[in-house]
Amino acid sequence: MQGKIIKGIAGFYYVHVPGRGTYECKAKGIFRKEQVKPLVGDDAEIDVLDEAEHTGNISRLLPRSSQLVRPAVANVDQAMIIFAISHPQPNFNLLDRFLIMMEQQKLPCIICLNKLDLDQEGKGREYAGIYRSCGYETLTVSADRKQGIEELQNLLRGKTTTVAGPSGVGKSSLVNCLQSGIVMETGEISRKIERGKHTTRHSELIALEENTYILDTPGFSSLGLFDLEKEELAAYYPEFASYEADCRYSGCSHTAEPVCGVKRALDQGRISPLRYENYCLLYEELKAKKPVYR
């Protein structure tokens, strides 16, 4: 029998078999011997031990099409990064870090801006415009009022999508809008500090429909830049590419050089000041990073 691992906790793996339900399984000893660890998202063959109790053993893992490091998951097709338009105010530096992290793992990204119902100033349209101009699929939704949910479902259909975002942005509420049968615990925002309680405690695949899964991951409040040198950062800002030919110096950092096509485009309003400011902050962070000698 073949299914997909949707959750792993304390040595037990929960394998979803379409039309049959979810089986609680242990991995056979050969995996430990070969130093192979089953991952959430793995397609697996299982031997059923007790059909009534829905228990079994994982006997074989099928070949992986992809494997992510963070979160540790297999066979993911795309990422969806969720931020709130307001309540709390979006941290765009953190959003750019998420985009870089996902692009490092070669995952296409959807940016989902939630809480459209609280957007009294029309900021959602402005924020979406910034990231659409950089080439990212971006949409504004309201989990509370079910606005934009159908469009979002169309983007997820037939794929396995990892969902990421900081706490308090309505991530779990949005996931609940997309699926039925499993109601995730949702946390309230602390009015005093406008941060959400961490309600997702482990990575779990949730079946939305046939061949459509989402992977919810714990909320993040900070995110370091891993295995990235300052000279590589510009490649993760795709809107820079069209203007780099106008830089005087090859290897231009787009920060302090006197003749820079990227800075000229910024002055002409063709590059978002918000994005450029984040680039400069991240560049300085990477510049200050202690070198790692291998």
Image: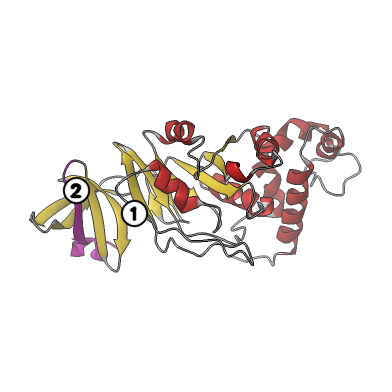
Residue 152 in percent (x, y) is at: 47, 35
Tell me if I can see residue 215 in this picture.
yes
Question: Is residue 8 positioned above or below 16 on the image?
Answer: below
The answer to which image quadrant residue 30 occupies is: bottom left
Residue 159, given in percent of the width and then of the height, sits at 39, 37
Quadrant in which residue 203 is drawn = bottom left
According to the picture, the residue beneath numbered tag 2 turns out to be 21
Helix, strand or loop status at disc 2: strand
Q: Quadrant of the C terminus?
A: bottom right
User: In this picture, is 112 found above or below 14?
Assistant: above
Front in this rendered view, residue 190 or 97: 190
81 in the magenta segment: no
Q: How is the image coloured?
A: secondary structure
Number of the label disc, if any, that sits on residue 160? none
Amino acid type, callout 1: Val
Q: Residue furthest right?
A: 258
- In the image, 229 versus 85, the foreground residue is 85
Which residue shows up at 51% across the image and 61% down it? 188
2 or 1: mark nearer the eye: 2
Q: Residue at x 40, y 48 (%)?
A: 176
Write down the region rendered in magenta: 19-35
Disc 1 marks which residue? 40
Residue 94 as seen in the image, left or right of residue 74: right
Residue type, label 2: Gly
Crowding near pointer 2: few (<14 within 10 Å), some, many (20+)? Answer: few
Q: Is residue 239 left or right of residue 294?
A: right
